[in-house]
Amino acid sequence: MYEGKLYLGRGVGRSLFVAFFVVSLFAFGSAIVGWVGLGFVRDAENEVLEGVYPAARDAQQIALEATAFVLGLPTLLNASTVKELERHKAALVRQEKIVFDLLAKKRKQNYSQDIVMILDPDIRKLSHDFNSLTQLSQEIIELEDQLHKERIVLINLTDNVIDQSEAELVKYGDDVVRTSQKFRNAIKNGRITDANNTFEKFFFEDWKIIQEIYEIKFRAKKIKGQFLGIQDISRKNRLRELQNSMIPDLRTLIKLLVEIRVNDVQTDFAKSASGLSKSISRSNNIFVLKEKIIVNNNKTETIRKSAENTGVVVRNSVTQFVSDIQHEMESKTASTQETTSNTRITLIFFAVFTVISSIAIYVVYINNNLICRLQRLYAATRDINNGVLSKAVKISKDDQITDLEKAIESFRINSLQLQETEKQLKVHTQSLERSNRDLEQFAYVTSHDLRAPLRGITSLAKWIEEDLVAGNMEEVTENLARMRSRVTRMDSLLSGILQYSRAGHEKEQGLSLEVKPIIRDIFDDLNDENRFSLEIISDIDSIVVKEAFFMQIVGNLISNAIKHHNKDKGAIVISLLKTGSNYELRVSDDGPGIPEQMRERMFKIFQTLKPKDKLETSGIGLSLVKRLVDQQKGSVEIFSSKAGGAEFVVTWPCEM
Amino acid sequence: MTDVTFLLVEDDEIDIEIIQRAFKKLRIANPLIVAQNGIVALDILRGQGGHEKLGQPYIILLDINMPRMSGLEFLDTIRADEALKRSIVFMLTSSDDEKDILRAYENNIAGYVVKSNADTTFEDALSMLDSYWRIVELPPR
């Protein structure tokens, strides 16, 4: 019925509860500290894993993609056809989208917003550059196309001129041959005038024309070369130079073509000249085209370079960003580590404190207040269990254990009382047992010793009867006397038995008796034949003692000494001393003494040394003395006297 | 065969006379020696203390209640004595106490006879003894 009840009221229960509560508070505190610290660490971890690291990673990816984009831009410039341009553009658009998507993704995330903000304008710039480049490339392609066409035209024209010139020159070559032949002939023939005319015609007409044609061919070739060379010009000033050198040449050529008077080729030349002139004078002439192309190329180059730079800037920004983020991570890690160590220290502190406080509580309170007292109680209970009841149970403090202590103390007292009672019971039992033994012995001996005389009487009666019948009177008288003596013996035995059984039961107080006179009286009474002398040694005048006790003891001992003496005369010495809290009575004689092996049985009732026919004694005396002495818790012993006889020493306590 | 001597160890004079009369009546002529207690009986058996040594064969008739040395003590003593331990002993005692009977038989007595008041002549017992020594083989010397 005590289980399940909650004892918080007083004493042990409350104290233990408080102690446990305090300790568990500390433990709880440790847990909280751990929790919080762990929280910090986890937050930091999360930051790194979900914030910082992805930001760095993604920023680097942006840089990568942006760089790819930048590297892809020149492909626009390499495109020679619109189709190719479209293809490259498409690829770059995809790449651009990748970059923008990345940016868009990171714009919303922590840690990346900054870098996105930084990269945004650069990426936009790249985008813009991309558009510009696309546009420019497109323009360049168109211009190249136009240039190409124009060049073809111009080269065709010049080729025509050259061809025609060569053809004419061939023709004129023939003419020259004929003319020279004619000249030679003329000369040969003496036709100086013919020769002169021929020469004049040749020199002033043909030769002039040949020269003109040669010059045309020469200029046409030169111009063709220059037209071809336009292809390779990349710089505006060089173009200008060429232009400046070609325009006069062209003009000259055109002029020559126009002014030449050669019937065959005049028209053609005029056409060519017209064509050339038209081409040159167009607003979109080859030079203009080429200039535009050059300008565009320069622009694209600029833009390309700028894009490259932007790419570098982007990469640098990202690198910086990553580095910053790394630093932040490091510092975060450092602070996390610091937090961790702080947490650890705090935790250890709490834990150590918990342990210390537990130990302290145990030592100071539990051990002293509970364990020690319980141990004491255990020892006390064990002692009580083993019968050691002398030590009182210590009562300490005022709690449930105190109640227990009080209970066990009262139990000890009860046990003590019980022990006492048991002791007394034992004493009583022992004395009862002794009485029973005595009684048995008594009954045994009595029945035997009483039967013997009866047997004797029966036999004697029988013999007397036989003798009377036979008329034999010799022994009759004697037998009758023997009969009588046996009757007397029985009577004295019965008296002795009575006396023995009555011994010590008289309710009497101790009287003050005068020692020497009383002893003397008893002695005189027994010493009727006057064969003995008595010496009394005592410095005690009177003692307080039960009269019957004293007189029966003295009487029996003196009577024994007298009865068992073996000589005519004897000396008896009686001494009475006080030793400590006892009286000591010594009765010694100079008789035959008592052998050692006989001494113990002397005190048995009816024991005699000699047969009853030799010495009429009841055998009661010493057993009576022993009984009286035992009743008073004294003792009686037999020794040998100095005179060679027996010495009886009786001791009994003074307080009776 | 030589006549057996009877050693009667008894202290009561009437009891002694009863035995003597019975011997006469039964005409048992065997010698009857009386010792009045165990000590004297030992002296007689050993030939000490001024007594002549009792010669074989003999039968001991033993009472229990005697001064100085009781019959049972005497019995213990002779059973412990190398020369005397084979002695034939009959208990002749008034004690019918079981303890005494047991103790006597533990010492290998030949028989236990209780002196009752009725049979005061002991005649039956003695005639039994007379037949006993004649019939039974006694231990050799």
Image (cartoon, grey):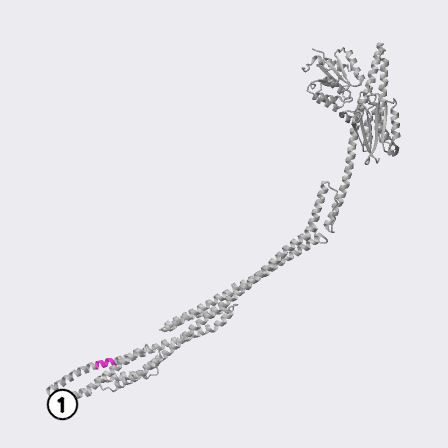
Residue A188 visible within the image: yes
Identify the residue position indicated by label 1 in the image: A193
Residue that lies at the very extreme toward the left in this rendered image: A189
Is residue A497 something that shows in the picture? no
**Quadrant where the C terminus of chain A is found in the figure:** top right
Residue A163, position in %: x, y? 24, 79
Farthest residue in the top direction?
Answer: A471
The picture places residue A176, in percent across and down from the top left corner, at 17, 83
Q: Mark 1 belongs to which amino acid?
A: Thr
Q: Is residue A85 left or right of residue A349?
A: left
Question: Which element type, helix, strand or loop, lies under badge 1?
Answer: helix
Q: How many marks?
A: 1
Quadrant assignment, res A464: top right
Direction from residue B61 to residue A92 in the image, left or right: left
Q: Residue A102 in the image: x percent, y percent?
A: 47, 68
Tell me, yes or no, whether the highlighted magenta stretch contains residue A476: no
Q: Is residue A610 left or right of residue A205?
A: right
How many C-alpha atoms fall within 10 Å of the one at disc 1: few (<14), some, or many (≥20)? few
Q: Is A508 drawn above or below residue A343 in the view shown?
A: above
Chain bearing tag 1 is A
Query: Which of these two is toward me, A485 or A324?
Result: A485
Residue B123 in the image: state x and y as whole percent. Answer: 77, 14
The quarter holding residue B57 reads top right
Q: Measured along the vertical axis of the image, is residue A622 above or below residue B57?
A: below
Choose top left, top right, bottom left or bottom right for residue A528: top right
What is the magenta segment's predominant secondary structure? helix
Judge whether residue A166 is colored magenta.
yes
Q: Nearer the viewer, residue A535 or B120?
A: A535
Tell me the magenta residue range: A161-168
Residue at the outermost bottom position: A193
